[in-house]
Amino acid sequence: MKAQRNQILTVLLAILLAAPVFAKQEMLHVLGTVTDMQNAPIVGAKVRVKDANQSAITDIKGQFKLQVKKGVVLKVSAVGYETKEVKADKPKLNIVLKAQSVKVEKEIVVADVAMYIPNVPQMYKAEKRMAMGAVQSQNAYFAPSPFPVEQNTEEYSKHAENRFLDAKSDPLSTFSLDVDAASYSNVRRKINNGQMPEKDAVRVEEFVNYFSYDYPQPTDKHPVKINTEMHECPWAKDHKLVRIGVKAKEIPTDNLPASNFVFLLDVSGSMSLPNKLPLVKSSLKLLTNNLREKDRVAIVVYAGAAGEVLPSTSGADKQKIFEALGNLKAGGSTAGGAGIELAYNIAQKNFIKGGNNRIILCTDGDFNVGVSSEQGLEELVEEKRKTGVYLTVLGFGMGNYKDNKMQVLSEKGNGNHAYIDNLQEANKVLVNEFGSTMYAVAKDVKIQVEFNPAQVSAYRLVGYESRLLNKEDFNDDTKDAGELGAGHTVTAFYEIIPVGVENRYGGVDALKYQKTEAPKTANASSELMTVKLRYKPIDSDRSLKLEVPVEADEMPKASTDFNFAASVAMFGQLLKDSDFKGDASYKKVVSLAEQGLGKDKQGYRREFVRLVEAVEQMEK
């Protein structure tokens, strides 16, 4: 009996000793940060559970989240860095990656290329660099790129600069709102690589609208609100500068309607460089990380031909989308027209009524097979936009970048155009500004300004040369115009020559055969001008009109936003060597911008100041 009891005790003891083996392994919620040796966050690093199908991508702060079994090994990798394995044994992990050593076999002359990872490893050194060094930003490091470029075949549309118009003979100014910001980020990468940009690459309104401004939200039934402000013009002291700001209503991301996305990706041979297709894939992973279960994604690619590589998939199945992106490789010619046709067909097939149906085209714009001319692409997209599917165009790369074709596609496709030069810019466009980039709250938005000739001698619209409309177009609901996304701010400037101030830019003689005096009602009015805005609700083809008068009395003190936006407009005119830059200078730009820094949580305004200072040094 005693022996039997001892046997039972032995078995029980063995079970107790083995209990940890059979117990469920402890789960761990890991919040990690991936940085380089200088403690700068690495954006877009991949953190994968070793020997398992589970991973995460680091965000703009270099952070990631994973729920894993305690003690598993994480494999951490990023372009330009050595892969590292780390044991997940605590809830907070700080992972430091070492930069890879790269041997440069021959001299590389750095051209206008931008690294797609903002944390550029310093071992990428050529024997000969541009005189211009890297520009340090608060949140990112933009360095000259190591990638060689054989020939610069970039293309930009030419537009004559807006001139001063007489307020008596031309009292109406009409234009479509431009929500694009591609020009600024494209020019920024050129400057960061030691090059002055082509004048046609500079679109002043896109410089100004790269930045967000603190305009009050609409509080009535309309999804948009007009704001105005007037002060002395900083580059022409005897002129006035009027800022028109439009703010679209904000919608929390979780409350946005379901999205039906088609990623239309250029995988032709021209996209093989690391700052093209690899950056495209990393950028879209950032977007995918923020999709909801009700959102859907299909992926279409095109090179010599077009094809669907991922049917419409729920945003909850992120790993499936990641794998489809990860398998893409570049090669072949570029049949952009065929890809656009297929993408629209798939978007229509999966159309969500009342939802956000949108194609996201990622390309360098170098189409060379099938429909490839500006006119051909314009006709194709104009026809397709009738389907209710929007087109967002994201530009990548350098050397052969076709900005002119990107502009046509976005303008005619009821969409917007952004240039992605690194993952930080991708995060800004696709994550931080998701609503304004990807979901429209008003379409065909136009502005018409009527000037009071009793107060205004002449005026000019600063920028928007490619968005000008005829005065009759304002009331014509068949005329296409720009779209405004949720929470978007759009800004336009008018430079005004008041009555009694000499017009140094021409003007015309008094007419001989008709009277040109202002009517008594104009003379009696204290109004400088009236701003009218037309827009269509997303679900309607009939426009609604808003109207706001602007008084001739100057406001006592310029707002922070006014100062900063005016400094950006001045900088754009200096880069274009505008006929109307007056006494503008880079020192004045910096001084005015510093008065307009405000809170600047993301550091974009401070980065702008450093960019201006860099150009000033380049021109000495």
Image: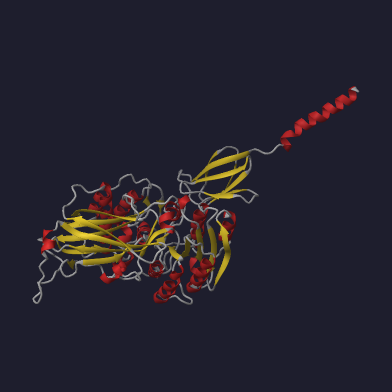
Residue 560 on image: x %, y % = 27, 47
Left or right: residue 242 versus residue 446 is left
Image quarter of residue 166: bottom left
| Extreme-top residue of the structure | 2
Q: Nearer the viewer, residue 436 or 249?
A: 249
Depth order, front residue of 395/120: 395
Q: Position of residue 595 (x, y in %)?
A: 25, 47
Outermost residue to the left: 512
Q: Quadrant of residue 107?
A: bottom left
Query: Is residue 83 visible to the viewer in this orientation of the structure?
Result: no
In the image, residue 126 sits, relative to residue 4, either above or below, namely below
Which color scheme is applied? secondary structure
Residue 15 can be seen, yes or no: yes
Relative depth, front residue between 557 and 83: 557
- Which x, y percent locates residue 545? 30, 61
Q: Position of residue 36 (x, y in %)?
A: 48, 46
Q: Is residue 79 above or below residue 390?
A: above
Q: Nearer the viewer, residue 105 or 381?
A: 381
- Outermost residue to the right: 1
The quarter of the image holding the N terminus is: top right
| Quadrant of the snapshot with the C terminus | bottom left
In the displayed structure, does residue 212 sit left or right of residue 66? left
What's the residue at 36%, 48% (across, down)? 603
Name the residue rendered at 13%, 62% in the picture: 522
Q: Residue at x 20, y 47 (%)?
A: 557
Q: How many marks?
A: 0
Looking at the image, residue 326 sits to the left or right of residue 398; the answer is right
